[in-house]
């Protein structure tokens, strides 16, 4: 969760060279109604990654008016068998609202319990902050959900590329020990990891 605002609004000046926690504000007299408006979700997604998922982020980078307001959202579209792979948001809880199709949504607690549900249109699941979660299209057709976050910049940390596709790479010995497998398995996973980012 983000800290609370100290003024009505603080539309981000994304081009400012100043580095602060969040972004500096544009001068209020230059801000108009249009700054509080975002129409980037009107078109449905066309570009699907190899996991058959398309993510449209409506965070402070896409919508600078969110700066200091502590909220943001994503739209996630799935082709059949599409998957939003296991990931965490280091700075936010997530509310997931399905609007189309049939989605398996799950997250794992720090006690290694999987909490899950198969959701259809109009149904909501909540994901606690920082915990690993995923969604998979388990219906016949496409699926869509909207994620709402209590941060202007929830961040996404995907588990597979974090472990197998970092720069530089994590040493193999760390991974063979962590997963209790031999080098062949690590090589195999690394060889497929480039499509996962
Ligand atoms: C879904 O989990 C998302 O982060 O958009
Ligand atoms: Mn998420």
Image (spheres, helix red, strand yellow):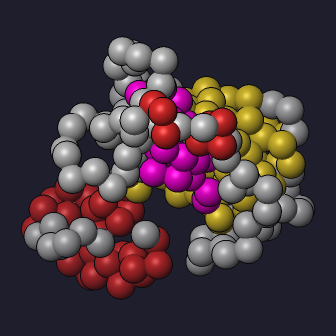
Q: Is residue 61 magenta?
A: yes
The answer, for residue 106, to whether it is visible in the render is: no
Q: Is residue 142 magenta?
A: no
Residue at image position (40%, 35%) is: 27
User: Looking at the image, is 85 positioned above or below residue 165?
Assistant: above
* Of the pair 174 and 148, the residue shown nearer to us: 148
Counting labels gives: 0
- Observer able to see residue 69: yes
User: Quadrant location of the N terminus?
Assistant: top left
- Quadrant hosting residue 37: top right
Give the x, y percent position of residue 192: 42, 81
- 112 left or right of 80 in image: left
> Residue 96: percent from the left, percent from the top?
67, 35
**Outermost residue to the front:** 29
The location of residue 76, given as percent across then percent down, is 67, 54
Span highlighted in magenta in the image: 55-74
Could you say which quadrant of the image residue 117 lies in? top right
Specify whether 88 is left or right of 94: left
Q: Which image quarter holds the C terminus?
A: bottom left
Quadrant position of residue 139: bottom right
Q: Residue at x 79, y 56 (%)?
A: 42
Task: Tell me: residue 192, above or below residue 15.
Answer: below
| In front of the other: 17 or 197 | 17
* In front of the other: 161 or 65: 65
Residue occupying the point 61% across, 59% down: 55
């Amino acid at each position: 969760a983000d800290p609370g605002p100290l003024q009505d609004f603080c539309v981000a000046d994304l081009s400012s060279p100043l580095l602060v926690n969040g972004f500096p504000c544009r001068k209020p007299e230059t801000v108009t109604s249009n700054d509080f408006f975002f129409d980037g979700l009107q078109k449905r997604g066309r570009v699907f990654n190899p996991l058959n998922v398309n993510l449209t982020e409506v965070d402070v980078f896409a919508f600078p008016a969110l700066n200091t307001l502590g909220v943001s959202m994503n739209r996630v579209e799935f082709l059949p068998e599409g998957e939003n792979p296991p990931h965490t948001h280091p700075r936010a809880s997530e509310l997931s609202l399905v609007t189309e199709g049939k989605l398996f949504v799950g997250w794992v607690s720090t006690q290694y319990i999987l909490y899950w549900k198969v959701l259809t249109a109009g149904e909501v699941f909540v994901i606690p902050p920082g915990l690993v979660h995923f969604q998979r299209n388990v219906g016949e057709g496409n699926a869509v959900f909207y994620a709402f976050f209590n941060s202007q910049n929830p961040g996404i940390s995907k588990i597979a590329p974090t472990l197998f596709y970092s720069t530089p790479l994590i040493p193999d010995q760390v991974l063979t020990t962590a997963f209790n497998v031999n080098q062949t398995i690590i090589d195999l996973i690394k060889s497929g990891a480039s499509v996962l980012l």
